[in-house]
Image (spheres, rainbow, N blue to C red):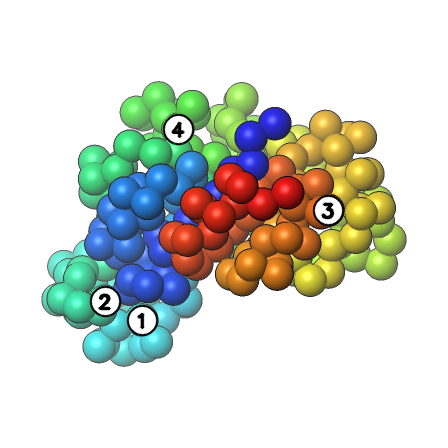
Amino acid sequence: MTFLTIGHRGVMGVEPENTLRSYLRAERCGMDVIALDLRLSKDGALVAVHDPDVDRTTDGSGAVADLTVAELRELDAGQGERVPVLEEVLDAVRVPIQALVGDVATATALAALILRHDLTSRIEVASAQDGVLAETARLVPGVRTVLYAASPGGEAGSVVERASAVGAAAVAVDVHRLSLETVNSAHAAGLRVTGLAVDTLDLLRLARALGLDGAVTDFPEIRSTGRFTA
């Protein structure tokens, strides 16, 4: 199976996170998938922002949910970049998208867009919330989903059971907290396993030693190195 490299918010280690500049560089560097975060603006647009507010990632302040797209457009998201809406990202890059959502309202809006534009083969939906993934699967039959988990839980089977219960195709877990037992359990259940965030050569070696299917990374060099690391 191919070892996938997933660009974290583009390649946020070298470019402003969740910006078109970052996504375009991730594509140029050969990332297999681009992972981005989605939130709803005040006027219901799907915007690529990680935090619930814009204070850390832009020169503005306030909650994303309290700002319209027009207001978000006025902010500098780094090096003159603007906060993009999902449709802009889909137009700008051609690689598959892993869209991380944190609530049912955002998931519902994303599901509507996927259905409207027939994007089930291009967008997979990720969340740390089991209910969000379950609702997404209900709204978009056949959509691929990924369960994000900071840790696999108290027992190796915990994250596997959660993912299987909501019909997820994959789990993404902090690579520092992954064990071979968890990876084997997930693979036995037919789940893909990715580690996050794999940002050093040592962590890449660990990811390959554990038999992971891929790595979420902030840095483009992990992609090229990953092809040759046993």
Residue density around tag 4, few if under 14, some if 14–19, many if 20 or more, within 10 Å: some
Residue 5 shown left or right of residue 25 in the figure: right
Amino acid at the residue labelled 3: Leu
Q: Earlier in the sequence, mark 1 or mark 2?
A: 1
Q: Earlier in the sequence, mark 3 or mark 4?
A: 4
Secondary structure, mark 2, is loop
Q: Which residue is mark 2?
A: 77
Q: Which residue is mark 3?
A: 210
Q: Position of residue 98 (x, y in %)?
A: 45, 41
Secondary structure, mark 4, is loop
- Look at the numbered discs 3 and 4 and tell me whether their residues touch, using CB distance below 8 Å: no
Report, in whole angstroms, how far the alpha carbon at label 3 lies from the one at label 1: 33 Å
Q: Position of residue 161 (x, y in %)?
A: 79, 40
Q: Earlier in the sequence, mark 2 or mark 4?
A: 2
Amino acid at the residue labelled 2: Ala
Q: Residue at point 61% right, 61% down?
A: 202
Report, in whole angstroms, how far the alpha carbon at label 1 lies from the one at label 2: 6 Å
Q: Is residue 90 visible?
A: yes
Report, in whole angstroms, how far the alpha carbon at label 3 lies from the one at label 2: 36 Å
Report, in whole angstroms, how far the alpha carbon at label 2 lies from the one at label 4: 26 Å
Q: Earlier in the sequence, mark 3 or mark 2?
A: 2
Q: Position of residue 153 (x, y in %)?
A: 79, 57
* Residue 122, label in figure: 4
Q: Earlier in the sequence, mark 1 or mark 4?
A: 1
Amino acid at the residue labelled 4: Arg
- Look at the numbered discs 3 and 1 and tell me whether their residues touch, using CB distance below 8 Å: no
Q: Is residue 35 visible?
A: no
Report, in whole angstroms, how far the alpha carbon at label 3 lies from the one at label 4: 27 Å
* Residue 57, label in figure: 1
Secondary structure, mark 3, is loop
Residue 152 shown left or right of residue 202 in the figure: right
